[in-house]
Image (spheres, rainbow, N blue to C red):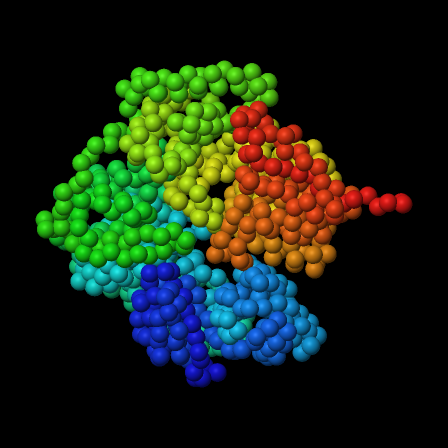
Amino acid sequence: MSDALLQCMASAPRGFGDLLARELTSFGGTDVRERGNAVSFTGTLEVAYRACIESRVASRVYIELARLDVPDDATLYAALREIDWAAHVDPASTLACEWSGRHPAVTNTHYGTLRMKDAICDSLRDATGARPDISTERPGVRVHAHATDTRVTVSIDLAGEGLHRRGYRSDTGEAPLRENVAAGMLLRAGWPEIAARGGPLLDPLCGSGTIVIEAALIAADIAPNLWRDYFGLLKWRGHDPALWAVLRHAARERADAGLARAAARPAQAEGPLMRGRDRDVRVLAKARANAARAGVTSLVAFEECELADNQPGGAAGLVCTNPPYGVRLGGHEAARQIHRDLGLLLRERFAGWQAAILTGAPDLGLELGLRATRVHTVWNGAIEGRLLRLNIEAASHRDLRPAVERRIVDTKLADTPGAKMFGNRLAKNLKRLSSWVKREQVGCYRLYDADMPEYSFAIDLYTSAESARRWLYVQEYAAPREIPEEDVRRRRNEALAVLPEITGIAVGDIHLRTRRRSAGGEQYNKVADEAEFHVVAEQELKFWVNFNDYLDTGLFLDHRLTRARLRNAAARTRFLNLFAYTGSASVYAAAGGAKSTVTVDLSRTYLDWAARNMKLNGYTGEMHERIQADARQWLELARQERRVFDLIFLDPPTFSNSKRMEGVLDTQRDHAALIDASMALLAPTGLLVFSTNAQKFKLDPQLLDRWEVADISRATLPPDFERNARIHQCFEIRRRARTGD
């Protein structure tokens, strides 16, 4: 099979399809055709294997098994079943299925996935008498089907999981910039040519070092996935281990030669060719550890340095960086200042250099004060950005827009009439809530919730479980378009000027974020890389929170009483937490004496966070299970496996179209199906608690005919959320008692 020509497809992050096409051609692929972020090609198994090992921008590599023309559900199932799956899948291994595209008979991707799984397993059972287990986490074989009308292409995913996961980052959630996006930035910027002539690279805002490490891998000709320990091809029955070993060995030899060349370069006396600098010593420690795992420690240096203190040193080279775009005090305003400071640094000290800067928002590039020679629209996961390529010279400088914006915290603003009214309301709220806070020992609560429409903020106060330190988390609701930006900015700055005075909380412990309508799936995106976690207390339990890096802190305060009810009901139960987020409900259930907990979420980052929360409270061991999966898909698998739970918490997002999720989730539309699927796992005397934050949610009345439903929304509304009675709706759902028993 190694010499046979195969029809293949590879994908890359959006904006890098042309780079992927070039790579595939260099590996020996023919008939290479770019199709947006995907590239089709013809090649031997060696070409496909090289793409898995050597491609710097690929996300997935597929080998086509069949092209089907199937007009309806029956012919789809039959055609899928006719494929010789025993030639590809070992029934003793594990299997994952993925469906994408549109087919007239497939109503959603979840259904398509289930239909594929059924056809494959039935075929294997007929051929071998056995069927594989289903696993979405690093399966033995991952099968992908893509539909275009009635035409369906069925493929084996050789990568098994995203090829951006090189294996050198210890925590998949530690950096928002994907490795293959960083590599694509460097290739776009001409780094291979700059490195070949001995030019240096600098990332002055390096975080955990992804750009610098990818630059080192390129400079030393080290295959990006050489050290990766998992590929979907390894347990595929079409796998050629001998060919794979030969290609890996050749890649290791090139890596050794590249490292030797780098070590022998004359410029080595001036220090490493590639440098990363950052003000945060904690992320620099991560960067050094990541570089060690990538095998490039000798090529790179990570140094503590303020942005303004960066000096070029040596010959001209490339500045490549991905600046933060705003989650600390000031949010987007702070990001603007960082871009201004970066632009000033480049203009004053880096003349003759080139730069590649990935901005998280289109307007931020204007703050650099430099004209871009090229602008590329690229995606880092689901986040759209602009890659700016710059030649830093006098001709590229442009006049900056007038700097009319004042510093975020201006104490003079505290004396304006609006600020005084806002401060008075804050003081009243503090006094009103003080007795309740003291009596109930509440450490984290909502202080202000858009009490005054002109000052449209939600302000939450958090208290450390380890010290007297306190923080304010300020969520600014996006103003209507008709409100002038200058009025929005003035009111924001007035509020920020008042907060330290009224609350006694230091400016550096106030965190601001502007809330906009979610694009769906955003809940799984990391938006910064400061990795600053704090421990707070709630009901004598402890939780990790993060005010900077994610769209939410990790603890939904409005569900304080809901979690308490779960704890009270949890004794000796088998507890299931669906759409679990950071697992706070699982912690409460464990604290209430649950025999076991199962925590299900789509995000590995949040599952790891949930594990940290459980460990923080002393709940570890096999009885506490965590599963990364689309909850809807997992519910069907759990039903097939006849799993049973006594207590279930179901709190889905209002809406999600995450690329990791099968189809689109709309809680208003889908809640009845979710509840029914959850009830299928519920023990006869069990309890399901269903909650939603959908503001206009209406419970499907047909559920009242099938189940015993009690609306407990009012009973789960804590005093600090009384201004917004629709912050969530909550229901207890049980099986109806049998009549005549």
Looking at the image, which residue sits at the far left?
A: 394
- Residue positioned most to the right: 740
**Residue in the picture at 69% in, 77% down:** 126
Q: Where residue 46 sits in the image (x, y, percent)? A: 41, 77
Q: Position of residue 376 (x, y in %)?
A: 27, 57
Residue at the image position 62 percent from the left and 48 percent from the top: 671
Q: Is residue 554 above or below residue 118?
A: above
Residue 230 shows up from this direction: yes
Residue 594 visible in this rendered orientation of the protein:
no
Front-most of residues 706 and 663: 706
Residue 251 located left or right of residue 1: left
Name the residue nearer the viewer: 611 or 636.
636
Image quadrant containing the C terminus: top right
Return the x and y of residue 722 as percentages of the image width and height: 56, 26
In this view, the residue farthest toward the front is 482
Compare residues 493 and 701 and report the one nearer the observer. Answer: 701
Marker count (numbered) = 0
Is residue 117 shown left or right of residue 401? Answer: right
* Percent coordinates x, y for residue 650 in the rendering: 63, 44
Q: Residue at image x 19%, y 53%? A: 372
- Image height of 432 relative to 52, above or below: above
- Give the image quarter of residue 248: bottom left
Residue at position x 61%, y 76% from top? 75
Q: Is residue 506 left or right of residue 616?
A: left
Q: Is residue 202 left or right of residue 235?
A: left
